[in-house]
Image (cartoon, rainbow, N blue to C red):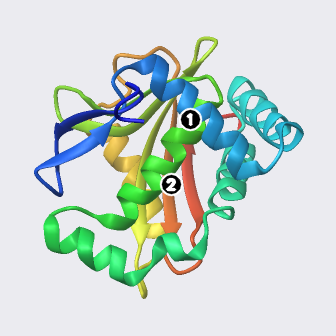
Amino acid sequence: MYQSGYLSLRPGLIDDYSLDYPNHEVLSAMSALLTANIFGSPETSGASVTGLKTALLNDDAAIVVREFNRLLAKIPYDDYNSSLREHFEMRNPRANFGEWLYRSTLLSYLYGAGLRVETELHGHRGRSDIVAEFRGHTWVMELKVAKKGENAGKLADAALSQIIEKGYAETFDNAVLLGLAIDDELRSITEYRVKGSKQ
């Protein structure tokens, strides 16, 4: 894929170099393939994407979270392998492996669904995890990962508070703010807080 131009070398976070997509078009195409591959068939992936888009248009956070959890349930358990986690954290001890894995997975899904997506979007007081836009509906999302013994509800509260306090949505009209808490043992979103949704 590197030699054919679908991947390019960039300075790496973990190693000296990392493979990355050369442009947005390739990222979107690869994400669409990944989404179809995760859900197993064009019919299933199409239904999931349709459900997600409908929920985004209707400002329905419960359905968005349900679709995210359907996606997270499809991640093979060995992708959470402890040796992979240790390798990642040894190379970059400041990085949060769990948050990185979940954010990357959700990003690929959103890209594959055909949404306009930004990650780590810099603002005047910080940067948001995910900003997704579909037909004039903007969602600003912050992820927190609850490790063993941590209260997911408090982390969901903290995620929503961070969006508000850091002004991540100030440049968007009528954005839905979504604070997500992912239980690292259950590997799903167990708590969320929302502002600007119908719920």
Amino acid type, label 1: Ser
Towards the viewer: 158 or 95: 95
Question: How dense is the environment of label 1, judged by Cα within 10 Å: few (below 14), some, or many (20 and up)?
Answer: many
- Seen at 85% across and 44% down, the residue is 44
- Is residue 63 or residue 40 the one in the foreground? 40
Q: Quadrant of the C terminus?
A: top right
Q: Which mark is residue 31?
A: 1
In the visual, does 1 lie left or right of 45?
Answer: left
For the residues marked 1 and 2, what is the alpha-carbon distance in whole angstroms?
A: 22 Å
Classify mark 2: helix, strand or loop.
strand
Kindly identify which residue carries mark 2.
180
Mark 1 vs 2, N-terminal side: 1
Q: Quadrant of residue 170?
A: top left
Q: Decide if residue 151 is on the left or right side of residue 14.
A: right
Position of residue 43 measured from the top left corner of the image (x, y, whole percent): 89, 38
Q: What's the residue type where badge 2 is placed?
A: Leu
Residue 98 drawn at (x, y percent): 39, 66
Q: Residue furthest front?
A: 3
When the figure is inspected, residue 155 is found, relative to residue 67, above or below; the finding is below
Residue located at (52% from left, 40% from top): 108
Tell me if I can see residue 95 in this picture: yes
Residue lying farthest to the right in this orientation: 43
Q: Camera-side residue: 67 or 151?
A: 67
Q: Is residue 128 left or right of residue 175?
A: left
Residue at x 22% of width, y 35% of height: 9
